[in-house]
Image (cartoon, grey):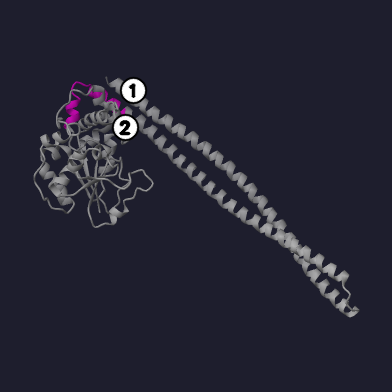
């Protein structure tokens, strides 16, 4: 059985894995195999990190054995939606104030991957996991998802024992050890991974345009998950009427652009399916053509055999030295045989002509299919370019909104 540990990056996933190892005695896994943790022996021991036989995205990545097992597997993911989750799985979703999450992730990218990403790029999902904080939260926490436990980072860090007891109850487990690791212990294992940061309140390091962008992108999710006071506090000093106007304009324009992009993606999907279907049809037609060509060759071989037999019969008839009666009987027999062979030859020739006509039609059909496939591939390239242009247009709109909010 799988219990997913899902979160936007830097929302307490690693700390949760540490508590699961320390308090519940269970090892944990990651669909990415986490080179940052797996490459650090102390972090590996702390989190109980175990390697999977293959990493998400590889062709042999398979979770079926985990699901079929009676053992419990805690599996980390940052994926932007629930596409890997099945109804029998359980999900622990960790959520954190987006401003703190973005700042922490910004530092992590700098420390571990030498990537310089802006606050706005992270909030809008321009870096891994390719979706912004708000959309990530929306996809994982939408109503109607059973077997899901939401845990706030702020509760996890302020009352870790209560949080791990809640997770244990959710997973039908018992807490074996209530010795919660202190921040000093965690920081001592990895100062970069477990750096001290504030969990509540206003952060003055965030620019006003980025604050406005964060509120534009996720005010609904912030309110729903108890961060409603954060945007209110953060918007101090910003023209709220301007932000409200920009919000409406932003979502109206971007909403239309996204609908058009989705429409194009749907058309691209249909074009791709047509290309695959055409390719499959060409393969089947080629197989039929090869089969008919084989039949034609076989018919021609039979025809040659009939002609050879007819010539042999004529030679035997002309060289025969039998009595007149025997010759007459032989002539009758050979004549009947010749007539039969001639009739068979005529049938074979007619069949050959029919096969040749079928081969011609199939060749024409294959030529038509290849033309159709080329048209589909050209349309696919055009749609991909158009989608790219639309995505860039949305980025430009976002930049304009941010500059106008200054």
* Residue found 81% across the figure and 67% down from its top: 312
Closer to the camera in the image, 335 or 383: 335
* Numbered label attached to residue 125: none
Marks counted in the figure total 2
In the displayed structure, 30 sits above or below 406; it is below
Circle 2 residue:
127
Percent coordinates x, y for residue 351 in the rendering: 71, 60
Q: Quadrant of residue 220?
A: top left
Q: Nearer the viewer, mark 2 or mark 1?
A: 2
Q: CA distance from mark 2 to mark 1?
A: 20 Å
* Residue found 21% across the figure and 37% down from its top: 11
Label 2 residue SS: loop
In the displayed structure, 190 sits above or below 207; it is below
Dot 1 alpha-carbon crowd within 10 angstroms: few under 14, some 14 to 19, many 20 or more: few
Percent coordinates x, y for residue 383 in the rendering: 47, 35
Looking at the image, tell me whether mark 2 or mark 1 is earlier in sequence order. 2
Label 1 residue SS: helix
Magenta residue span? 229-248
Q: Does the segment drawn in magenta span residue 243?
A: yes
* Residue placed furthest toward the left: 179
Circle 1 residue:
400
Horizontal relation, residue 45 to residue 277: left or right: left
Closer to the camera in the image, 164 or 112: 112
Dot 2 alpha-carbon crowd within 10 angstroms: few under 14, some 14 to 19, many 20 or more: some
Horizontal relation, residue 374 to residue 328: left or right: left
Cβ–Cβ below 8 Å for labels 2 and 1?
A: no
């Amino acid at each position: 059985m799988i219990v997913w540990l899902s979160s936007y990056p830097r929302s307490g996933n690693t700390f949760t894995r540490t508590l699961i190892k320390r308090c519940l005695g269970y090892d944990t896994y990651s669909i990415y195999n986490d080179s940052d943790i797996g490459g650090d022996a102390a972090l590996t021991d702390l989190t109980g990190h175990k390697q999977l036989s293959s990493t998400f995205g590889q062709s042999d990545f398979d979770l079926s054995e985990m699901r079929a097992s009676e053992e419990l597997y805690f599996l980390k993911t940052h994926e932007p939606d629930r596409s890997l989750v099945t109804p029998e799985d359980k999900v622990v979703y960790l959520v954190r104030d987006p401003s703190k999450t973005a700042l922490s992730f910004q530092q992590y990218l700098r420390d571990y991957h030498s990537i310089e990403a802006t606050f706005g790029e992270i909030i809008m999902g321009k870096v891994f996991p390719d979706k912004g904080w708000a959309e990530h939260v929306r996809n994982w926490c939408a109503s109607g998802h059973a077997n899901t436990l939401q845990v706030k980072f702020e509760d996890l860090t302020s009352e870790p024992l209560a949080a791990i007891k809640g997770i244990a109850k959710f997973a039908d487990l018992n807490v074996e050890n209530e010795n919660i690791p202190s921040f000093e212990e965690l920081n001592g294992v990895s100062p970069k991974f477990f750096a001290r940061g504030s969990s509540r309140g206003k952060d003055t390091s965030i620019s006003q345009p980025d604050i406005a962008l964060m509120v534009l992108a996720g005010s609904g999710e912030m309110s729903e998950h108890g961060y409603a006071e954060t945007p209110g506090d953060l918007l101090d000093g910003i023209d709220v009427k301007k932000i409200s106007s920009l919000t409406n304009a932003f979502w109206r324009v971007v909403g239309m652009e996204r609908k058009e992009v989705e429409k194009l993606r749907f058309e691209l999907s249909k074009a791709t399916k047509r290309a695959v279907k055409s390719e499959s049809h060409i393969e089947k037609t080629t197989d039929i053509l090869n089969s008919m060509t084989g039949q034609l060759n076989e018919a021609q071989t039979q025809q040659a055999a009939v002609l050879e037999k007819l010539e042999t019969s004529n030679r035997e008839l002309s060289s025969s030295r039998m009595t007149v009666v025997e010759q007459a009987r032989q002539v009758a027999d050979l004549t009947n045989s010749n007539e039969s062979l001639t009739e068979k030859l005529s049938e074979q020739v007619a069949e050959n002509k029919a096969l040749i006509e079928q081969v011609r039609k199939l060749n024409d059909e294959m030529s038509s299919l290849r033309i159709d496939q080329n048209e589909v591939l050209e349309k696919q390239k055009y749609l991909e370019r158009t989608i790219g242009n639309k995505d860039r247009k949305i980025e430009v709109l976002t930049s304009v909104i941010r500059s106008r909010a200054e």
